[in-house]
Image (cartoon, rainbow, N blue to C red):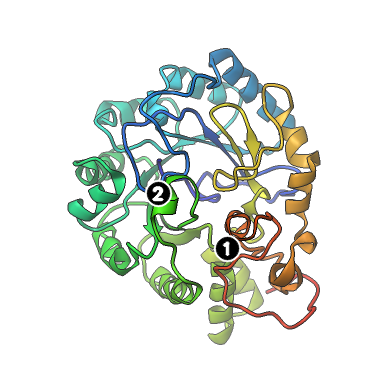
Amino acid sequence: MSGSLHPNSGPHHAPRDYARTPLNIYWEMTQACALACRHCRAEAMPTAHPNELNFEESLAFLDQIGDFGDPLPHLILTGGDPLNRPDLFILIEEARRRGIGVSITPAATAALTLDVLQRLKDAGVEGLGLSLDCSTAAAHDAIRGVPGTFDRTMQAIRWGESLGLPIQVNTLAAAETAHDIPAVYELLKPHDIARWSLFFLISVGRGKVLQPLSAEDSERLMTWIFETSRQAPFIVATTEAPSYRRVALERMREEGLTGEQIKRSAPLRGAGIRDGHGIMFVSNTGEICPAGFLPISAGNVRSQRVAEVYREAPLFKSLHDPRQFEDRCGYCEYNALCGGSRARAYEATGSPLGTDPLCTYIPPPKSHGPHTA
């Protein structure tokens, strides 16, 4: 599985109502991928799913995105490996023709060449997502399942730099990789990347063979992320760890920053965005889900309109409203700012509205109302 771009990794957008329009739509173009990553959400296979959206159905889906109105969501092409779609460049052209911004997260295979990256840039792709899970070839390739993946990733970073493509690097945060994360940061520091996002493992798909960090270890890592972000030459962020916003807010308040300074800070620019609220996911077979790591279908683009599902389906409506969350996440004063990972809550409790077990914070009993900076 290719890493997913962070919800704020696309171009800057005006403020929007995330209950009406997502910031990003992740489209799993295909399940086909030459890698065998140990944490792959999509459980990618060498060949495409027989029920994959065909070209005409894909065009119809792109047409549906226009229903959201201005500003349109940003479209992130993921997989599997989107480079395995033979109609990839035509679909990028069609998305751009409809005024839809596009980013892509290709797999680091032999198909990812300098020529392909040049074609992606020429087609108007606005962001490139690459995955780098460890600081050495042996460790990274062991997770990705194919020798040479580390070297191809580093080469793709250098090529992307030379072309001026905005790059996000995604790094797995799991029990097996956490000790190496500072070394990954040192490896990336000399490179001209826009964002480094640490993905806190959700045990879905093949990810069940890896071990997630404990809540206590996650809190320590989030503190390190915040401290590192103050001096990093690029934005440092998290994926599937919205409680990082609470950690960052607490640290900034301790430092005496004003409310306005806090609101402008990088960790809070994605405040309120979570699975199903600000982001949504369309699978290779057209299923409409809150997120790739929250694989509950609320409809299918073959028979329903994606904007209508996002705005009106009971699943999405419940995810838009943090007051419906259960247990700690339901009465936490940070629930509007954070809301917890809905995917991790679902994996842990069986309910997408449950409490995110990654968070160590114990809110005052029955506290109410959104937290403000």
Numbered mark located on residue 275 in the image: none
Residue 290 rendering spot, x and y as whole percentages: 64, 44
The quarter of the picture where the C terminus appears is bottom right
Residue 59 rendering spot, x and y as whole percentages: 59, 18
Horizontal side of 4 relative to 304 (left or right) equals: left
Residue 75 position by quadrant:
top right
User: Can see residue 265?
Assistant: no
User: Can see residue 254?
Assistant: yes
The residue that label 1 is drawn on is 242
Residue 270 rendering spot, x and y as whole percentages: 59, 58
Q: Nearer the viewer, residue 287 or 152?
A: 287
Horizontal side of 316 relative to 55 (left or right) equals: right
Residue 114 rendering spot, x and y as whole percentages: 25, 31
- In 3D space, how far apart are the residues under numbered discs 2 and 1 (Cα atoms)? 20 Å
Relative to residue 25, is residue 263 depicted above or below? below
Horizontal side of 122 relative to 62 (left or right) equals: left
Disc 2 residue crowd, few under 14, some 14–19, many 20+, Cα 10 Å: many
